[in-house]
Amino acid sequence: MSAALIWCPFESEDAAAQAASQLLDEGLIACASLIPGVRSLYVWQGERGEARECGALFKTEAGLLDKAVARLAAIHPYDTPAIAGWLADAVPPVTAAWLGELV
């Protein structure tokens, strides 16, 4: 078993919690760490912008990464959410075993 992480900002902590709850209920993640107060500076459609968001770091089993990212994209309230997922190569066996319970 191996681990994967998914990072994604949301418009509010409530929106992040709602998405996290849905992914937890569907067995696609084992945990979500919500980080309110994220200050995002960005360029969108050629315009510079700034927003206060809630970041979310989702933990899942590597074999579920693509499915979890696709599902998050489908349920996210933004039209074009910024979602990034990657494999976490260095995790202790206990963490890998915990995430492996998802599959």
Image (tube, rainbow, N blue to C red):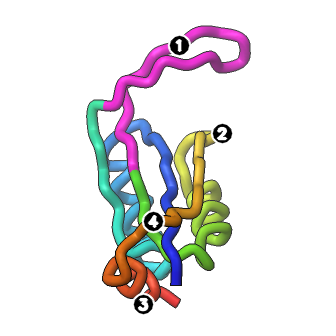
User: Where does label 2 land, which residue?
Assistant: 80
* 58 or 45, nearer to the observer: 58
Residue 22 percent across, percent down from the top left: 44, 69
* 67 or 86, nearer to the observer: 86
SS at badge 1: strand
Image position of 54 (left or right of 10): left
Q: Nearer the viewer, mark 3 or mark 4?
A: 4
User: Where does label 1 land, which residue?
Assistant: 49
Q: Earlier in the sequence, mark 2 or mark 1?
A: 1
Q: Nearer the viewer, mark 4 or mark 1?
A: 4
Distance from label 1 to label 3 (Cα)? 41 Å
Residue at the image position 39 percent from the left and 62 percent from the top? 20
Tag 3: Cα neighbours inside 10 Å, few (<14), some, or many (≥20)? few
Q: Earlier in the sequence, mark 3 or mark 4?
A: 4
Distance from label 3 to label 4 (Cα)? 18 Å
Magenta range is 38-56
SS at badge 4: loop
Residue at the image position 45 percent from the left and 65 percent from the top? 90
Distance from label 2 to label 3 (Cα)? 31 Å
User: Where does label 4 land, which residue?
Assistant: 90
Main SS class of the magenta portion in the image: strand
Q: Nearer the viewer, mark 1 or mark 3?
A: 3
User: Where does label 3 land, which residue?
Assistant: 101
For badge 3, the amino acid type reads Glu
